[in-house]
Amino acid sequence: MKTVTRSTCCFCGVGCGVLIEAENGRITGVQGDPDHPANFGKLCTKGMSLALTAQSETGRATMPEMRLQRDMPREQVEWSVALDTVAARFAEVVEQHGPDAVAFYVSGQLLTEDYYVFNKLAKGLLGTNNIDTNSRLCMSSAVTAYKMALGADGPPTCYDDLDHAKTVLFAGSNMAWAHPVLFRRLEEAKAADPSIRWIVIDPRRTDTAAMADLHLPIQPGTDVALFNGMLHHLIWEGLVDRNFIEQHTASFDALKALVRDFTPRMVAGICGVTEREIMQAAEWFGASDAALSLYCMGLNQSSHGTDKNLALINLHLATAQIGRAGAGPFSLTGQPNAMGGREVGGMATMLAAHREISNAAHRDEVARLWGVSQLSDRPGLPAVDMFEALHAGRIKAIWIACTNPAHSMPDIPRVREALAKAEFVVVQEAFMLTDTVPFADVVLPAATWGEKSGTVTNSERRISRVRAAVEAPGQAKPDWWIVNEVARRIEARNEAPKTLFAFENPEDVFNEHRTLTEGRDLDIGGLTWSILEESGPQQWPFRAKALQGEARRYTDGVFATQDGRARFHATHYLPVAEATSARFPFRLLTGRLRDQWHGMSRTGRIGKLFSHAPAPALSMQRGDAARRGFREGDLVRVSSRRGNLVLPVQLTDDVQSGTVFAPMHWSAQFLASGGINETTVPAVDPASFQPELKHAAVRIEPVELPWRLVAARRGDVLALQAAVQPLLKECSYAAISIEEDDLIVLRAAHGNAPADWLPRLYEALDLPVGEDTLEYRDARRSLDRRVVWRENIIDGFVFAGDVANAEALLARLCDAAPWSGPRFAVFSTQKQTNVARDRVVCNCMQLGESRIQAAIAAGATLPELKSKLGCGTVCGSCVPELKRMCEATAVAT
Ligand SMILES: Nc1nc2c(c(=O)[nH]1)N[C@H]1C(S)=C(S)[C@@H](COP(=O)(O)OP(=O)(O)OC[C@H]3O[C@@H](n4cnc5c(=O)[nH]c(N)nc54)[C@H](O)[C@@H]3O)O[C@H]1N2
Ligand SMILES: Nc1nc2c(c(=O)[nH]1)N[C@H]1C(S)=C(S)[C@@H](COP(=O)(O)OP(=O)(O)OC[C@H]3O[C@@H](n4cnc5c(=O)[nH]c(N)nc54)[C@H](O)[C@@H]3O)O[C@H]1N2
Ligand code: SF4
Ligand SMILES: [Mo]
């Protein structure tokens, strides 16, 4: 039977509505929901691929697993055993060492109801505030700054503002890739009104920057200086709104005194942009009818991320660019439910419904609503400190859910040590192949997107329903249920057990959460599960008796502070935490790619999403590379004071001299190392505790790795990946890429052939010697090659030692044409034309760079590319890149 279920995309904070098509218990397709106000039917490449990511059960966590003894492998156990054990171990640690000896590390990808139950278990039942989340790595600077400046967390803006803004300032946001569906909306607004100005502040020339009217490629970490300089110029030019400042704000004078020194000239020196550009940006912002800023990790992931946020909000307050259509400081949330996590207070520094741990009245309120005697007033440990405490043995037991800290935290060598030392590690996961799962004493298999039910809140404070379209595989269970079951068991150990965890379904949890919000800034007292069912997604605040939520906040100039005035903050400029030096001369920027999601546990399952960027890379400016003699694809070692990894170099004009960029996505599931966080710095912002994931100081050196390998195999790619993955770490460099839905490719390099490695690789790749296998060995030259056919079509191969003809053979394999002529000729397959695999630009039409380039060379314009080739016409994620390719050719000719 065919069903269609309305739900929400599980990737980014845009929160697009989706229609999930399912048949016989399997998800068969996903369409954009035309009625959802976040996307009106549109989806980006990742959303369009959701069905594919849900197709295979290979690699899913389907049964609870437990180590019955330390250092023994885990075994599958019944749910009751796993739940009893987790409850007992957590309760025992609390009894022996006090509540702060346990910790929870959860995720902005949990649903609000999951999050709520976790938070209640930690703070309400166990009595610890040690519950933090990956949102610490993501949104915490934005939260802190909103509270300090406006009096409450959450953006004052909404998506409708994208249609009304006349000046759009993108600060540290590569929205073209990270929030594509909203970016489409901005493109449409600009196409309709070409007088709209776009300013992009990003050290790199991203696809977003390439579309801007003004790109300020500032030196990394210098945003505060830039914003202070813009304010200096606004004051000088009389573009500040004196009236608004006097009536609705406080503390302007101290800021004014501070920015006196930040002349455009001085700022130009710090930021590495021109005085004219700074003044231009200030004027476009201040004189605009409506200035909207959109900001993300380029501001937040900084050791002074709070100040970066505050300095930007200062600009909005000084020019009254807030509280009206098209104006305001709009922090884009990264994860699908980063907002929901904040709402339920699921972080170490806050309580439910935007309440404060340090506020006794707030603690009492929550204690009363939960029916517990009191809440802990000891601040919980934020993420980086939490793993430090685990390392130091102060935290004995940790429960990790829906996040992969062994990959995504800064300085992962230290995180791995901490997890290895911990007494008890619980990992609640939907997929087994992650870098954190190996550390688990207990794995709790979680249902995931398409299988679970609840709510999420997107970037514009809009609460949407997430619905199950199919059953979870095996014994996987919804996250809220797992936590609720453990909590009930812990409660049952108490002498007079209360029933804090009487929840029977997500709706029960939602209802209790709603009660806690009443009277707060995020009040959803008027919102019910049935309103969400009947009228669709709703924004908060949505007060009792209201007919709908509020799209825009602070429209009356009254802010959420005690006196109703917004606060200016004097933001001093400080350089990044880790200075470059002769030993570590490069500034490492990290971030996202268009078609991958974080640690790739979902997007890394399908070939299509690798085609835009098949391999990991370190992007380096051409001149910097030339000075060091690096060519495209050369392997280099990237080292910081903490760790190192080997990556291929990618030459580019998009990063500046002295900076390099690496994507965050590749993990030890695909790479010989744990990814770029081997090197990143754990320095944190003093107010938000958010780490500076973007700005480590690194050294880039050539590596001599003469032994090379290219291997390819058709089959169940997920099973093949699982088999090959354990071998990766024995090579200096190794990277798995899923190039087609049934084709896995491995590229590796080492000093010489790693000992006893090839036989294990042959086994992992299922390449035994047999009738359809041809082998070639030359021990003297360390050559080892094996090719296998199936029905006379090449089905897999390994070329080790010298890989000169391997890429040509890979091209033959991809052609899937029957082999003609003698089989041994396969070892000397000659370079074909077009042997370099063509990077796919348009994912929907699977159109490669070369076809598009050829069309542009023949004179095609962007509209013609769209009409003739069809690229850019489905999801639109490639449009910025297509535009850029057209412009580059126009400049070159
Ligand atoms: N495709 C894709 N989309 C995603 C995600 C994903 O994994 N893949 N993840 C989601 C999540 S959780 C998040 S948080 C968002 C992140 O979304 P974004 O923040 O837009 O993405 P990033 O690539 O992390 O960083 C944005 C930019 O910050 C720039 N930057 C670095 N240092 C500085 C600086 O000092 N100042 C300024 N102004 N800019 C700087 C980088 O060059 C980069 O281009 O994306 C969400 N969307
Ligand atoms: N260098 C560098 N590092 C970064 C960043 C950066 O820009 N640069 N960005 C940081 C940011 S902003 C973020 S948000 C983090 C993200 O980092 P992580 O949170 O580690 O990212 P994910 O890979 O999305 O992890 C989510 C995990 O949950 C699992 N999962 C999926 N669905 C479910 C479910 O329903 N239930 C459960 N229990 N599990 C599920 C997935 O398989 C996956 O392993 O990375 C941070 N790290
Ligand atoms: S923009 Fe893309 S990833 Fe983000 S919610 Fe929409 S479809 Fe999902
Ligand atoms: Mo994030």
Image (cartoon, helix red, strand yellow):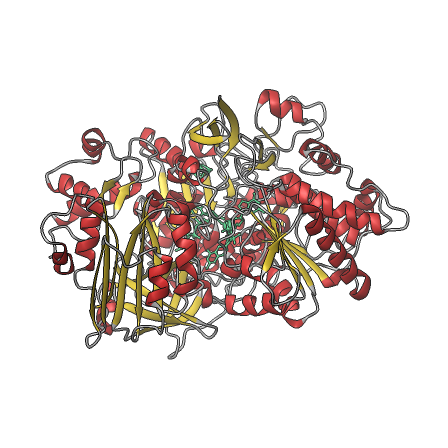
Q: Nearer the viewer, residue 514 or 664?
A: 664
Vertical order, 417 against 520 (above or below): below
Residue at screen point 74% across, 58% down: 89
- Residue lying furthest bottom: 582
Residue 205 in the image: state x and y as whole percent: 32, 53
Residue 406 in the image: state x and y as whole percent: 53, 61
Side of 1 where 275 appears, left or right: left
Vertical order, 36 against 429 (above or below): above
Residue 242 in the image: state x and y as whole percent: 55, 44
Residue 718 at least partly seen: yes
Residue at screen point 71% across, 37% down: 513
Residue at screen point 83% across, 41% down: 499
Side of 774 where 176 appears, left or right: right
Dividing the picture into quadrants, the one containing residue 366 is top right
Side of 76 where 635 appears, left or right: left
Residue 411 at least partly seen: no
Dividing the picture into quadrants, the one containing residue 485 is top right
Q: Nearer the viewer, residue 16 or 584?
A: 16
Q: Nearer the viewer, residue 304 or 469?
A: 469
Vertical order, 42 against 151 (above or below): above
Side of 443 where 412 appears, left or right: left
Vertical order, 390 against 25 (above or below): below
